[in-house]
């Protein structure tokens, strides 16, 4: 239930982002408004409630006394909207309609400056007829602020709070800026405007700098798909994986920066692919696939038209769907030599596509993704695929797992045995969260009889996944 509510929060942010790019009656905006109402009503009825409320505090979402990690990553636009309104969150009450949601998205997209106070914001909502959406009062550290909400000093899920306050803190600003960079370039392409290559390069360098600090728990970001446009989150995660692998391979710092930038830009050509193809929930027809497969060539042309001259970035954008054996697309000219950098981006691109949610498929666990990739002989550069598996392991750092004694844990480092990493226990045998100071660190290869029994990932695929050829 809580994950469903988190998905709703991200869906609201998606509506704001889509409205920024389009208009009230655009199919994307309309579809999100309808989907929100469709999902909200039965969930509230099941919970015996008639309202859906969540808070915003310290650039993070709060619900039922806990910080929400996923929405705080992917829902930046909604956080910024709350900050401009000077409110402490939102309350959505039945019977809310898709028309209400579209008006909410429009305000979120068009309001640029911070309002004077909460009263002004509430008057603005009233003026457009948003009677079923209420703005909550801001949070305070204690209850002495009169009508303000009290912020729990100890959120119910201490593990989430500690993760955001410590492990995740160095990444939050960087990942928000990465999402913003990719989204801004997509928006520019939709209006036939120039993209910001300098910003992408700067963000790539920031990502590498954070990676050097040892704080790049990339799988945390794979677990929480952005519902605005999977292509945005995909590019961010490919950039993160690329930076991680380039460091593992001991490539020079400048090359690591170029790899991160290439990851951010490699799918820029998808900005020219029609939305009905890009976000189609089912398998593409032959004609649709031909259109989709133009994105790599379109991307290279876009970068050249915008003044990009870096061969690493251009080659990765043009050739990240070319296989090691020469198959894939586009067709290689006789003179083309596939670089190691392009091979690295290709491995990251496919692994992310398999392990993250897409419109046409559910995610799968890393172990299954490795099996699929290893089985496809000739698809990948052996050194790059080996570096990916060696770096992330069967349970990448940041993965949430269940141990054989029913305790839940977070993987913190790889161990000498692939399926026996070092973990930090976050929940006891009954599922109750442990305070950070009481969370023991366990090296599984040193604990006889204790092993991982389950990999926890949102919506992980249980059925046989689509073949690699379907990944575009």
Image (cartoon, helix red, strand yellow):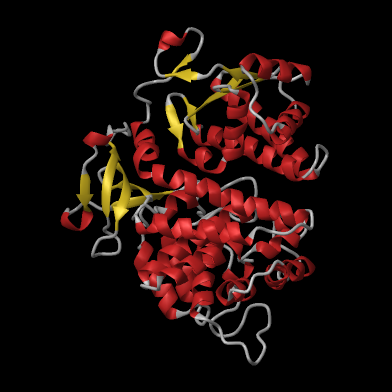
**Can residue 406 be seen here?**
no
Classify residue 399 as left or right of residue 407: right
Q: In the image, is residue 338 above or below residue 64?
A: below
Q: Which residue sits at x=40%, y=54%?
A: 210
For the C terminus, the image quarter is: bottom right
Horizontally, residue 417 falls left or right of residue 381, namely left
Location of residue 297 by image quarter? bottom right
Task: Find the residue positioned furthest to the right.
Answer: 25
Where is residue 170 drawn, in percent x and y? 40, 46
* Residue pictured at 22% horizontal, 54% vertical: 444
Judge by depth and name the residue closer to the eye, 266 or 93. 266
Residue 189, compared with residue 50, is above or below; it is: below
* Residue 203, percent from left and from top: 52, 56
Residue at 71% x, 23% y: name it: 96
Residue 99 in the image: above or below residue 190:
above
Instruction: Estimate the x, y position of residue 34 in percent, counting from the top left.
Output: 73, 35
Identity of the residue drawn at 23% across and 65% down: 416
Q: Is residue 441 visible?
A: yes
The image shows residue 191 at horizontal and vertical percentages of: 79, 53
The image quarter in which residue 130 lies: top right
In the rendered image, the residue lying farthest to the bottom is: 334
**Left or right: where does residue 111 sit relative to residue 61?**
right
């Amino acid at each position: 239930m809580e994950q469903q509510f988190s998905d709703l929060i991200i869906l609201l942010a998606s509506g704001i982002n889509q409205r920024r790019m389009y208009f009230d009656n655009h199919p994307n905006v309309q579809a999100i408004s309808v989907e929100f109402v469709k999902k909200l009503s039965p969930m509230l009825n099941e919970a015996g409630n008639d309202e859906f409320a969540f808070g915003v505090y310290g650039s993070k979402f709060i619900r039922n006394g806990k910080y929400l990690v996923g929405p705080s990553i992917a829902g930046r636009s909604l956080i910024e909207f709350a900050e401009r309104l000077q409110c402490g969150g939102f309350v959505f009450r039945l019977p809310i309609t898709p028309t209400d949601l579209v008006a909410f998205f429009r305000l979120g997209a068009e309001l640029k400056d911070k309002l004077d106070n909460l009263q002004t914001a509430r008057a603005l909502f009233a003026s457009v007829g948003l009677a079923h959406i209420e703005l909550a009062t801001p949070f305070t550290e204690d209850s002495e602020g009169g009508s303000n909400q009290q912020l729990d000093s100890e959120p119910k899920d201490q593990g989430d709070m500690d993760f955001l306050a410590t492990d995740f803190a160095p990444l939050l600003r960087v990942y928000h800026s990465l999402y913003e960079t990719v989204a801004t370039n997509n928006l520019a392409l939709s209006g036939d405007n120039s993209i910001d290559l300098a910003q992408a390069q700067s963000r790539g360098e920031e990502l590498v700098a954070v990676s050097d600090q040892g704080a790049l728990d990339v799988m945390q970001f794979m677990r929480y798909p952005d519902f605005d446009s999977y292509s945005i989150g995909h590019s961010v995660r490919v950039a993160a994986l690329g930076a991680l692998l380039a460091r593992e391979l001991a490539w020079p710092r400048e090359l690591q920066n170029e790899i991160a930038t290439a990851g951010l830009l490699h799918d820029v050509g998808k900005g020219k692919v029609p939305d009905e193809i890009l976000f189609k929930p089912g398998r593409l027809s032959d004609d649709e696939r031909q259109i989709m497969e133009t994105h790599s060539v379109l991307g290279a042309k876009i970068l050249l038209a915008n003044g990009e001259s870096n061969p690493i970035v251009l080659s990765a954008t043009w050739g990240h769907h070319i296989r090691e054996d020469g198959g894939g697309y586009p067709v290689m000219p006789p003179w083309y030599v596939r670089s190691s950098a392009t091979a690295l981006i290709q491995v990251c691109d496919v692994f992310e596509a398999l392990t993250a949610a897409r419109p046409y498929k559910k995610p799968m666990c890393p172990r299954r993704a490795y099996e699929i990739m290893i089985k496809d002989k000739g698809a990948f550069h052996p050194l790059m695929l080996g570096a990916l598996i060696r770096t992330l392991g069967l349970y990448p750092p940041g993965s949430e797992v269940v141990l054989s004694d029913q305790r839940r844990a977070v993987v913190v480092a790889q161990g000498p045995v692939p399926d026996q990493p070092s973990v930090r226990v976050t929940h006891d045998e009954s599922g109750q969260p442990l305070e950070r100071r009481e969370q023991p660190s366990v090296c599984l290869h040193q604990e006889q009889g204790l092993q991982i029994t389950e990999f926890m990932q949102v919506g992980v695929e249980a059925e046989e996944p689509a073949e690699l050829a379907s990944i575009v």
